[in-house]
Image (cartoon, rainbow, N blue to C red):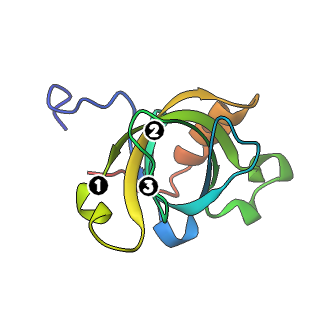
Amino acid sequence: MDRAKDRRRHTRYVLPSMYTTVEVRPLDSEEFEWKGHAYDISEGGMRFELDHPIEPGTKIAVRVQLPGAERLQLTERRPVYVFANVVWVEPDDLEQSGPVRMACTFTRFAMPGDRERLQGRLSSGRYSRAA
């Protein structure tokens, strides 16, 4: 891929959306209020869907459970926790009922080992690179 045309800093990987659970909460909440699924992910961000649209610019906390964790060691099974900013919402999804697709950029990983766990899972060969 021509890096001049690709603005992404990190390789993006396709996820089996119905099997990649995400939970999202606004930063002023202690509870993960919204549940949905991820479509793709990189070390720098994620595209996902929720039944609740989140305004672009909103700062959120995210918990991502990557599929296939049941075959890993206990420490590798933990979800990945990140803080992120919502960067876009699919306008067509706002005009109909149902899930809303959106994307976020990760601003920092929340817990020690989260970045390394995500990198390890993405580089495992289990997930395909996104176009």
Q: Position of residue 35 (x, y in %)?
A: 60, 62
Please name the amino acid that badge 1 sits on. Glu
Instruction: Name the residue tied to disc 2.
Output: 45
Mark 3: which secondary structure?
loop
Camera-near label (3 vs 1) is: 3
Quadrant in which the N terminus is drawn: top left
Few, some or many residues within 10 Å of mark 3 (<14, 14–19, 20+): some
The residue drawn where x is 30% and y is 72% is 96
Whole-percent x, y for residue 73 in the image: 81, 53
Q: Residues within 10 Å of mark 1 (few under 14, many from 20)?
A: few
Q: Which residue carries the number 1 mark?
A: 90
Can residue 21 be seen here? no
Q: For mark 3, what is the residue?
A: 53
Q: CA distance from mark 3 to mark 1?
A: 9 Å
**The disc labelled 2 sits on which kind of residue?**
Gly
Q: Is residue 9 visible?
A: yes
Nearer-the-camera pick, 96 or 23: 96
